[in-house]
Image (tube, grey):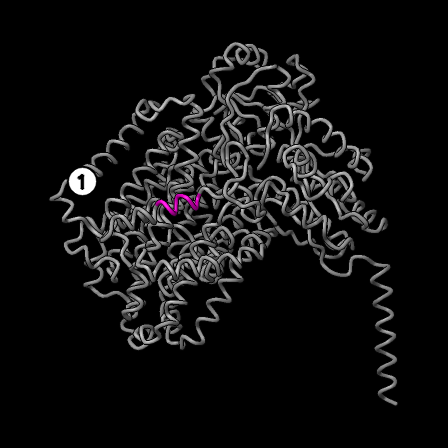
Amino acid sequence: MGDLISNLSLGFGVALSLQNLGLAFLGCLVGTLIGVLPGVGPIATIAMLLPITFGLDPTGALIMLAGIYYGAQYGGSTTAILVNIPGEATSVVTALDGHQMARQGRAGVALGIAAIGSFFAGTVATLVIAALGAPLTGLALVFGPAEYFSLMLMGLVFAVVLARGSILRAVAMILVGVLLSTVGTDLETGEERMTFGLPFLADGIDFAVLAMGIFGVAEIMRNLDHTEHRDVVHKAIGRLLPNKDDFKQSYKPVLRGTLIGATLGILPGNGAVLGPFAAYTVEKKLAKDPSRFGRGAIEGVAGPESANNAGAQTSFIPLLTLGIPPNAVMALMVGAMTIHGIIPGPQVMTKNPSLFWGMIASMWIGNLLLLIINLPLVGLWVRLLKVPYRLMFPAILMFCCIGIYSINSLPTDVMFIGFFGIVGYALIKFGFEPAPMLLGFVLGKLMEENLRRALLISRGDMMTFLDHPISAGLLAVALVILGLALLPTIRKGRDEVFVE
Amino acid sequence: MKRTLFTLAAALGFVATAAQAQGTYPTRPITLVVPFTAGGTTDVVARFMADHMGRTLGQQLVVENVTGAGGTVGVTRVAKAEPDGYTILMGNLGTQAASVGLYPKLAYDPRTDFEPIMNSASTPMLVVAKKDLPVKDFKEFIAYLKANAAKMNYGSGGVGSTSHLTCLFLESLLGVKPQHVPFRGSGPALNALLGGQVDYVCDQTVAIVPTVQGKQANGLVVAVQNRLPVVPDVPTSAEQGLPQFQATGWNALFAPKGTPKDIVTKLNAAAKAALKDETTRKRLLDLGAELPDEAGQTPEALAQLVSSEIDKWVPIIKGAGVTGQQ
């Protein structure tokens, strides 16, 4: 404990220097502004801004990059809430209720609770990293392919069981998502699958492309075919900040979301993507009136947003303690560290304590700064909604195109969002919900790859999933949930998760 | 009158800039295409080089990451770019040699579609075993692998990645066939090594050195001539009785075919200057990279390297029946 306090005071000593404080602020601000552009998530933002940290000392550079990371993450949620375009997997669920709140004139409240929930989650996660980072590393290592497959399966079962209305449609959409995730080069054989020989499909479909088409472009088309619907948004702006009632409704979801997100964030291979989905499912399950979800329930923003931010933070643990990046953003941070002459790994903590603890302290400071930057910005964002839609939609479309082009510099990606926009529009018209499809898309890829890896290692023996205790446990949970859902009485009370 | 003077001045100005454009390349920023994501080894090497070369040339080198299909998308773009010296490439072992074996429909020929500029940094390959694998050194590992190949698993960063190719090379030398378990990138493969889900991993120094230094995994051998300063305890393949096992990833600069000779010479000189610079040198060496000596810093040496690496790796790839992705 004494160690922890002295370490943290060392860290704050570094992070609170005028230069580092300024860099953290700059990072958070720039990250927020760029992250708000549809499609430009944390990965693209960091990649774009990496060179500007060249001239800085390593600690300052990493503090700034970490700031860009949280900033972009937060900015992505803003876009999800305001214009219903989730820039990355973790903000898909934020769009569900967040955008509905915006339509009801509660955009300010949604943005406010997202900022405050994120700040709380960030604070807790920073403490977790500082106090338990090293011991928790073990958790990342027990999760092998078998465990990971079972976790993803459980995630899909959650989605199936809790999908509303026509369970058949929800299952169909999840399966379409899984199918879409199989497009591209096979990981194991290197053969192309379902690419029709088209080179731009060789690496599969990019999540941002799919999400922006299905949500963003489709949403624009839907809005254009009944404009009166849209007027609601700019007529009533409402309060800018959450009030006492909002807090009362939100504090428990924030606590639960933080716990769920922080735990899943530690897992390797992008475990954090499950965080917001799981938090949303839990909130809906616990709610007295689950039918409010999908119609602007504040818990549906508070829980997932906290989970999102907690997971974003704790995913630093494998990077800082092992030097192994658990996901694409962290891989980029590894690159940033190497560019600055620091080879990430377990030695960083002992060889370079001021950098290590300075960065941890800066995480908390970064979260505080984000709150300070974002609360005043809420007013500005909300006023954006007043802009007449005929002016707004070309701008959104343009930013979508710029954003998507900036990720891979491929013109075909831009055409693809148009294609998925049409598909998404058709789906909405036929009453299919896009969210389960995106979940299937994200989990499907991870599930397939880990299933095959586990079977490669076990030489095709399916028992491997039961021989690993954690994997067996997760499968049992999935089975119980599925069983419960099939019981008629409980089925009647089945909740509705992915309601638009 | 005024007008004539103005036109005259403008014309003179134009002539002057035109002459300048010819004589003093570069007059505008140069795009350095990196066919992989930002933050990877090739990207890091490219950014170190770009930083110093930009100062030497007096024009910035802008790194553009054009990713996809194991790097071949970005390389194809450079192969088809205007050969004016304003679009150049940081290619590597994967894109400029292994790709010939991996992609039957490769849209470029690494030997004829480029003007080699210079090899800038090689990253030696290491073999690393999980901690509880009962072997003390590489010799024991070879014996163990030969006895237990059917049970053993190795992780890699993906089919056709440098880490996969190196393990394939080792297999072909030893005549064994352990199970390959591909991951998406080196990071997840290393995670599986530390978690004990795979038995060993072959990878380049940048990715793997920290885990060896931190004693979380057992560094068995470096597949190069000399021991590496970053991991001085790890013996070379020759010391361990398998001198044929030589494998290094390399990252080198190329321009599109037809780029004027004087421009290539200028770029080569700038790249040479970067490798002479203390800071750039140190940055690259800290990665565990090996830098080419004076003789290895010519376009001719790079052309030679490309062709010998194609001759070395393509049969290994074809022999293992690999197609693919990186």
Quadrant in the rendering for residue A269? top left
Answer whether residue B200 is magenta in the image: no
Tell me if residue A405 comes above or below residue A58 in the rendering. below
Q: Which residues are magenta?
A: A175-181
- The rendered magenta stretch, by its main secondary structure, is classed as helix
Image location (x, y in percent) of residue A72? 45, 56
Residue A465 shown left or right of residue A485 in the figure: right
Q: Residue at x 51, y 53 (%)?
A: A44
Say what secondary structure mark 1 lies in: helix
Front residue of this view, candidates A384 and A18? A384
Residue B246 can be seen in this image: yes
Q: Is residue A126 visible?
A: no
The residue drawn where x is 41% and y is 39% is A446
| Tag 1: amino acid | Leu
Tell me where residue B145 appears, x and y as whole percent: 54, 14
- Residue B128: x and y in percent read 54, 23
Q: In front: B298, or A13?
A: B298
Q: Quadrant of the C terminus of chain A?
A: bottom left
Instruction: Look at the image and tell me in which quarter the N terminus of chain A lies.
Output: top left
Query: Which residue reaches farthest bottom?
Result: B1
The x, y position of residue A200, in whole percent, is: 56, 49
Is residue B203 positioned above or below B254 on the image?
Answer: above
Instruction: Give the residue displayed 40% in from the left and 57% down from the top.
Output: A86
Q: Is residue A176 magenta?
A: yes
The residue marked by circle 1 belongs to what chain? A
Compared to B269, does B7 lie above or below? below
Residue that label 1 marks: A486
Q: Residues within 10 Å of mark 1 (few under 14, many from 20)?
A: some
Choose top left, top right, bottom left or bottom right for residue B317.
Answer: top right
Q: Residue at x 29, y 43 (%)?
A: A260
- Pick whichever, B323 or B326, lies toward us: B323
